[in-house]
Image (cartoon, rainbow, N blue to C red):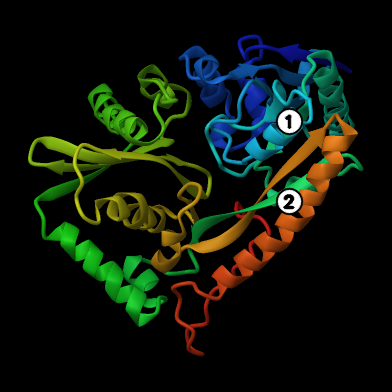
Amino acid sequence: MRISVHDSLDAIDPAAWNALAGADPFLSHAFLHGLERHDCLAPHGWYPCHLVAWDAERPCAALPLYVRDNSYGEFVFDWSWAEAYERAGGRYYPKLVTAVPFTPVSGPRLLTAPGHEAAAQALLGRVRELAAELECSSWHALFPEESALPEFDGPELMRRQGCQYHWFDHGYGDFDGFLGSLNSKRRKEIKRERREIAAGALTIEVLRGAEITPAHWRIFHRFYCLTFARKWGSPRLTLPFLETLNDGLPDVPVLFLARDGAEYVAGAFALHGKDTLYGRHWGCTRQVRQLHFELCYYQTIDYCLRNGLSHLDAGAQGEHKIPRGFEPIKTWSVHWIRDPRLRAAVRQFLAREATVVDRFVEDLGQHTAFRRDPDHAAPSTEHQDVDE
């Protein structure tokens, strides 16, 4: 077995990589290589250095990996660690990150062919050697799926908890069935919000895969750029990346567009996974009451119900999702820090933070939108693996 380091996925056969990545669209060769090819990464401080273990001439394990010179676009916030370390005379950047850039979606992170678990563990050893070679302060695996956490066990590895809000199909059948599971107050509020949109002049279009034309992508990318201009500055995903996404991922991209006559005024972008719809980005040219909720939540829930998808991951943050039928779930990250002094301080911080997150998730679970009468028991908020 040998391990190689790659500053691009150019040299890795797409079929061989995808055999390791499985059905996760974000880990597909098309998605990750598309980010590289279409200038989404380097301008924002993501520099690929993927690790691949080989069995003869075939990849048997892989670790998506990036050198970072900042923490933007990660959604696991370590700015305070960097500031504390640099105040103490250390240098936090560069660091190594295993993640899908700009994407707070849980999934596999250590990609392993059956029977090659030892090769995967060798990659975890190699990433720490690489950190020393590149003078990186640390390595961080962001949003590994919960079922994969045992792969990241080790005395120097530290787990961190976070919280997101996801929707799950508990056998609703259709949108009315979903509404019937909610308490009266929340059900009435959602109906009112949807009536406001229905009473307007807007037409909602749902487009998937080849139905999305280059013109549609240009329209959505304009919305996307406007959102970034209002909130964060430079947009991350380029128009060429979006325009070529369906080439490598047929029928995976989905657009939800709102049109006023001939003018498109808002849109949301999602990816159709094996059993999950992943809502990713939204934007608009003008503010319309309730339109964000309609496109990003109600249309996507309805899409899941019509297409047999059991799970909606509508993106990070947003406690306003709770009264709209979403449930709190824990997310995870794994961290390794070279300097034992900083490692000890972060370990203490994570222990305190975990207590707060546990309490926060438990409290939110008591305030979901679901009915609590005996005939309509609220669904459990315990989800061992949100992709099952």
Q: Quadrant of the N terminus?
A: top right
Q: Position of residue 126 (x, y in %)?
A: 85, 22
Q: Which mark is residue 44?
A: none
Other-residue count near label 1 (Cα within 10 Å), few / some / many at <14 / 14–19 / ≥20: few
User: What's the residue at 68%, 43% (across, down)?
Assistant: 144
Q: Nearer the viewer, residue 85 or 221?
A: 85
Q: How many marks?
A: 2
Q: Amino acid at mark 2?
A: Ser
Q: Position of residue 245 (x, y in %)?
A: 43, 25
Q: Is 334 rendered above or below residue 229?
A: below
The reply, left or right, for residue 72 in relation to residue 302 is: right
Q: Amino acid at mark 1?
A: Arg
User: What's the residue at 43%, 60% (across, down)?
Assistant: 321
| Residue 161 appears in the rendering | yes
Q: Position of residue 251 (x, y in %)?
A: 41, 35
Report which residue position mark 1 lands on.
87
Q: Is 222 rendered above or below residue 179?
A: above
| Residue 108 appears in the rendering | no
The reply, left or right, for residue 313 in relation to residue 68 is: left
Q: Which mark is residue 147?
A: 2
Q: Nearer the viewer, residue 320 or 169?
A: 320
- Quadrant location of residue 185? bottom left
User: What's the residue at 45%, 65% (across, down)?
Assistant: 322
